[in-house]
Image (cartoon, rainbow, N blue to C red):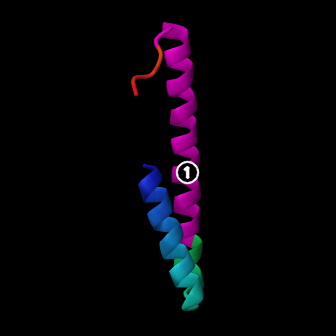
Amino acid sequence: MLGWAITFFIIAIIAAIFGFGGIAGAATGIAQFLFFVFVALLVISLIANAVRGKSPKV
């Protein structure tokens, strides 16, 4: 999911360079939403692992 956020961020930067404001704004919004979803899932995963008492496998 972080990969999708990065992809939309790159699309937003390229669209902004070429002057496509609407597309750049939409891609930025999608990237920001996906980033925060990724962070929320990360925090939930860390809390769940802490409650279970298991360390993450590396």
Counting the numbered discs, the total is 1
Residue 25 image point, x, y percent: 59, 73
Crowd tier of the residue under label 1, counting other residues whose Cα lies within 10 Å: few below 14, some 14–19, many 20 or above: some
* Secondary structure that dominates the magenta span: helix
Vertical order, 22 against 49 (above or below): below
Q: Secondary structure at mark 1?
A: helix
- Residue that appears at 49% across and 58% down: 5
- Residue that appears at 40% across and 28% down: 58
Residue 26 image point, x, y percent: 54, 70
- Residue that appears at 48% across and 8% down: 52
Vertical order, 3 against 52 (above or below): below
- Residue that appears at 52% across and 82% down: 14
* Residue type marked 1: Phe
Relative to the observer, which residue lies in front, 50 or 13? 50
Residue 24 image point, x, y percent: 56, 77
Extreme residue in the left direction: 57
Residue 4 image point, x, y percent: 42, 57
Residue 23 included in the magenta stretch of the image: no
Residue 47: name its quadrant.
Answer: top right
Vertical order, 3 against 20 (above or below): above
* Magenta segment boundaries in residue numbering: 26-54
Residue 35 included in the magenta stretch of the image: yes
Extreme residue in the bottom direction: 18
Q: Which residue is disc 1 drawn over?
A: 35
